[in-house]
Image (cartoon, coloured by chain):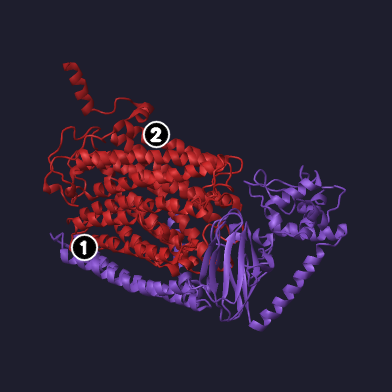
Amino acid sequence: MNAVLESSHDAHHHGPVNTGLKRWLFTTNHKDIGTLYLWFSFSMFLIGGVLALIIRTELFQPGLQFIEPEFFNQMTTNHGLIMVFGAIMPAFVGLANWMVPLMVGAPDMALPRMNNLSFWILPFAFTMIISTLFMPGGGPNFGWTFYAPLSTTYAPDSVTFFIFAVHIMGASSIMGSINIIATILNMRAPGMTLMKMPLFVWTWLITAYLLLAVMPVLAGVVTMMLFDIHFGTSFFNAAGGGDPVMFQHIFWFFGHPEVYIMILPAFGVVSQIIPTFARKRLFGYDSMVYATSSIAFLSFIVWAHHMFTVGMPLAGQLFFMYATMIIAVPTGVKVFNWVSTMWQGSMTFETPMLFSIAFVILFTIGGFSGLMLAITPADYQYHDTYFVVAHFHYVLVPGALFSIIAAVYYWLPKWCGRMYDESLGKIHFWLSFIGVNVTFFPQHFSGLAGMPRRVPDYAMQFADFNMISSVGAFLFGFSQVFFLYVIIKAIKSGQPASDRVWEGAHGLEWTIASPAPYHTFTEPPVFDDSEVHS
Amino acid sequence: MLNKAQLFRNAAVCVSLAATWSLGADELNMRTGVTDISKAVYDLHMIMLWVCVIIGTVVFSAMFISMLLHRKSRGAIPATFHDSLKLEFAWTIIPMAILIALAIPATGTLIEMYDTGGEELSIEVRAYQWKWQYKYLDEDLNSTFSFFSNMSTPKDQIYNKEAKGEHYLLEVDNVLRIPTNRKVRFLITSEDVIHAWWVPDFGIKRDAVPGMLNDLWTLVNEPGTYRGQCTELCGKDHGFMPIVVEAMPEADYDAWYLKQVAAESARIEALSKTFSADELMLEGEKVYASFCASCHQLDGKGVPPVFPGLAGSSVAVGARDEHLRLVYEGVPGTSMAAFGKQLDAAQLAAVVHYERHAWGNNTDDITQPRDVINLFSAP
């Protein structure tokens, strides 16, 4: 009995039980799984980035130079699918895995074995998606929004693999969010009430509920597609009495909350980082929580603003226009709170802070174009043009992605016990910042001038802006390879990090050693107000 | 070094961008357009833009002032405030008021756009992969005459073998013609996947959805040629289905309309004619180029396995009636459409004859319009 206790006691204070590949395959440790998620999402990010560069290469000049339209459509589709489901979402789940237990003072996630499963089914889903590109007839070519009947009656045979892969991703997300909810609600350190939780934990709690609500809807819509394709139903086939517009309603009932699934955790990350480097508590913590909740609620009643041109009755158009405009209010509250946090602080501008400030500015620009898109009569002119492409890339790239990069720089010293090279980090920031704006800002203009999205070739008047955009895309793409170099250099030979890492950092994650031991908080920590700052 | 070179190039591009800005604002902003609606939409767009610019300037200025003054390197001591109910209240109520002020004109314009009654002319817009069909409707909404509108930009321009023309990708073989100063209503639908019909200068866009009839209207004041594109991903040639509308002075339009009605009676006469093999090949080649070549390719080789080749195919050299039937009825569940709905008997006869005699296909039959009529009029 004593020996058993001794050995389990040993395991708590030492590294993983297995070594090599087995360690990663069988791990139930939240830190290992977080690491797996982060590396997986980074590799997907590079693959999705290569697809984007293929697109930008073809669009560098008018005319078809490198690829055929059929293949171009596969590139846009898979770029979207891989970036949304393979890069952004798993990166946030990885951050949650690493940080939620450390931030709430829990020894691990609530359901560690399920945690292992929810990660390890993902590589299969994406291997399947990517393999469709090599199948006869090609991979999915109907856009990441896969509107029926283009994705059913008119789809390549590989669409069935796509449906299966979406099911697997959905299962992974559902398991991940159950785990996050269970951890946050049950395993917080004594004294950490809900309204004292770090904002990253709050935003993830709300995101996890959004995921639980809408991933089954996505699973439902792809199952209906499967039935239309293989079992003779006509959900979306007008000739059989079905309705292609119903596909869009169901898809966007998933799709709009999905948009917030990709941005709420980003709000959380930025709300951790800005107070740290402003050396001042987050302004308006309560209103931040309420604003996040309102955004989550509103995300369920605005879906049809993606469908203003589909032909809805006037009353429907008006409802969705008003509901969409209201989202600007809680989103504005968040931006004002971040600015007020910075106001009269004592700021320093390390790499995570630079990325966070860029996030606030560029995300706000994406929010502005979003507000313009909400105005239905104007939306008719913007809809499905490059203006929309510019809009959602502004909220996803310098929005969601910048926050992930900021989070990596911010917590990396805690993960591996070593600092990154600050000047290299700053170079990475400036290259990314310039690259992202050179790529996406001109797309506002080409969209307003009338260039439709998802076209492999374009009329002469759009040539200048497309060329600028392509140059920016290559700059941005290569700066992310540079990011990989900065990270590997830090892991291998960075300066040792202190436990607190940043002068202004507060929160339970900074009370443990750097690097974080394999097992932490095996006994609940003491949580007092000195660690509250966001 | 590379980074520096790239930065330099970007800086150069930015300077040229600024130069473009001062030269032609048209390429940078939404078009004002030529209808009252498009002008109202443009105004809404500009109001929104300026509201965003003003709010952005205020918020970003506060940020930059803070970043400049409240930095540790200047010895700033952090303040301890972290809450203000008054402020939170203010920045909830003020944006709300701004939004209401913006919603009022937007609602007005939208209601106007939905006011479809009182039109003087109805045109059905029917979308196909990857072309438009325009049907001019009479008062009972029956078709008086109709035609297809295909992109007319040559493949050699697309593949950079010859210089690109002025209206590269935005030119069609048959232009949609409408009169100025008359309210025109468009009834929009699709035969296959979802497309979207957009003419930016009119400020109107609507999806063409199979099984659904959307309506839109316009009233153009200035004669001219206006160009747009399909704006919903519809498969391979989504980027190659432009829309060209010519708004004609009323008298010119009426003359053109009468000519079309006469041509329509000539077309109906042709259905009972017997053609020579040469005539069939000539007409068939034209029909093939507009209706078949985007998938099966001009050389008849197709894009296997998605779009089968026709040169030497079992269909094109097999039984004639089976071949006709396949073209007429299409292949359900694939991209092969039922061309019986798109082509008349004379065109079907010509194209099937052409397919059976082109690219080394060498059947000894001849197909006449009456063969088509006989085959499909049987009960």
Query: In x, y percent, where is residue A378?
Result: 44, 69
Shade representing chain A? red
Query: In x, y percent, where is residue A230?
Result: 56, 40
State the image quarter where residue B277 is shown: bottom right
Label 1 crowd (10 A; few <14 / some 14-19 / many >=20): many
> Is residue A127 visible in this depiction of the protein?
yes
Q: Given the image, on which type of amino acid does mark 1 rest?
A: Ser
* Chain to which mark 2 belongs: A
Say which residue label 1 marks.
A340
Say which residue label 2 marks.
A120
Shade representing chain B? purple
Q: Which residue is drawn at 83% across and 53% down?
A: B367
Q: Which of A233 and A60 is in front in this view?
A: A233
Query: In x, y percent, where is residue B280?
Result: 83, 58
State the image quarter where residue B271 is shown: bottom right
Label 2 crowd (10 A; few <14 / some 14-19 / many >=20): some
